[in-house]
Every structure is written in C-alpha cells, then in structure tokens.
Amino acid sequence: MPITYQVIKCTNPKGAEGVDYATNHAVKTGDYDFKSLTEDIQFATTATKADIVAVLTAAKEFIKTHLLQGQRIVLSEIGALQANISSKCFAQSVISLDAFDPSSYIKKVNIRFRPEADLLKYVRMNRHLKRVPSELLA
C-alpha cells in the first residue's frame, strides 16, 4: 500500500516576493482503530477476541498511568512514548519562589512518539508513494 501525498502551497523560505513555493504533504487515507487492530490480532493468533480486547484495554490504562508519572513508555520494536510540555520563557529574577505558578507558563502538553530505528528504516525502505490530485497540479 502506498503512502499518499499531495502538493500544497507553502511560504517562501527566504521571504522573497513574487515566487510561489510548494511542498509535498502526506495525506491521511483513513484510520486504523482499536476494533480493526483487535480483529487483525484475532485473525493472526489463536487468542480470543475477548482476551485481545482485555489485554489492549489494560495496556492502554497502564500507558496512561505511567505517562502521567513521567515515565517513558518503551514498546520494543515499535517506539517510545513520553509526555512533553512546551512553556513560555520567563525571567527567573523577576518571579519570587513563593508567588511562582509554573502552570501559568505552560502553553501545551503533548505526547511525543519516537519510532524505533528498525521500524523507521522499514517504512523508509519499503515505501511506495502515490500522488493524489491537488489544486496546484490540477
């Protein structure tokens, strides 16, 4: 199955006027959801659907718990998940320790995924690309 992409407009990297720029952008072709994963595992193994659902549900709960505890979740041969925050910079000398509320400086909380090197290498080596129509290349 190919990785689909389309050509989209992007800003000029050097800020010059009068030249239009474009880039290739991966396009989502659908979702692979919990139900599909459960069915595929059931088909590929001798485990029952109920057992698979129980294991995946428990794994999801453990992953959530350990992310909130600040731990990195390492899924061998897949990748690692870790909670991440981005924050505004602030002058340390301006804020007293008693009045400091760090949560007011946090802009967002994300979960970072880092794929395992072998998984990334597999996707890069076995990729097949297919361009879908776009406004720029109609």
Image (cartoon, grey):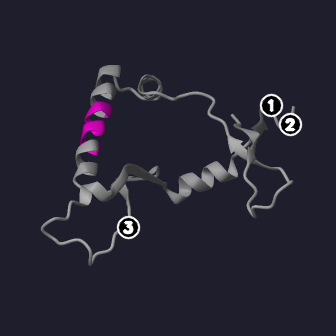
Determine which quarter of the picture holds residue 1: top right
Query: Label for residue 10?
Result: none
Dominant secondary structure of the magenta stretch? helix
**Would residue 70 be seen by someone viewing this image from the given angle?**
no
> Percent x, y for residue 50?
30, 21
Which segment did they paint magenta? Answer: 56-63
Q: Nearer the viewer, residue 75 or 13?
A: 13
> Pointers 2 and 1 in contact (CB under 8 A)?
yes
- Quadrant showing the C terminus: top right
Packing grade of label 1 (10 A; few <14, some 14-19, many >=20) is few
Q: Is residue 94 above or below residue 32?
A: below
Q: Is residue 69 above or below residue 97?
A: above
Whether residue 59 is in magenta: the answer is: yes
Instruction: Report helix, strand or loop for mark 3.
Output: loop
The residue where tag 1 is placed is: 133
Label 2, label 1: how far apart the Cα atoms are = 7 Å
Left or right: where does residue 101 sit relative to residue 133? left
> Percent x, y for residue 2?
71, 37
Amino acid under disc 3:
Cys
The residue where tag 3 is placed is: 89
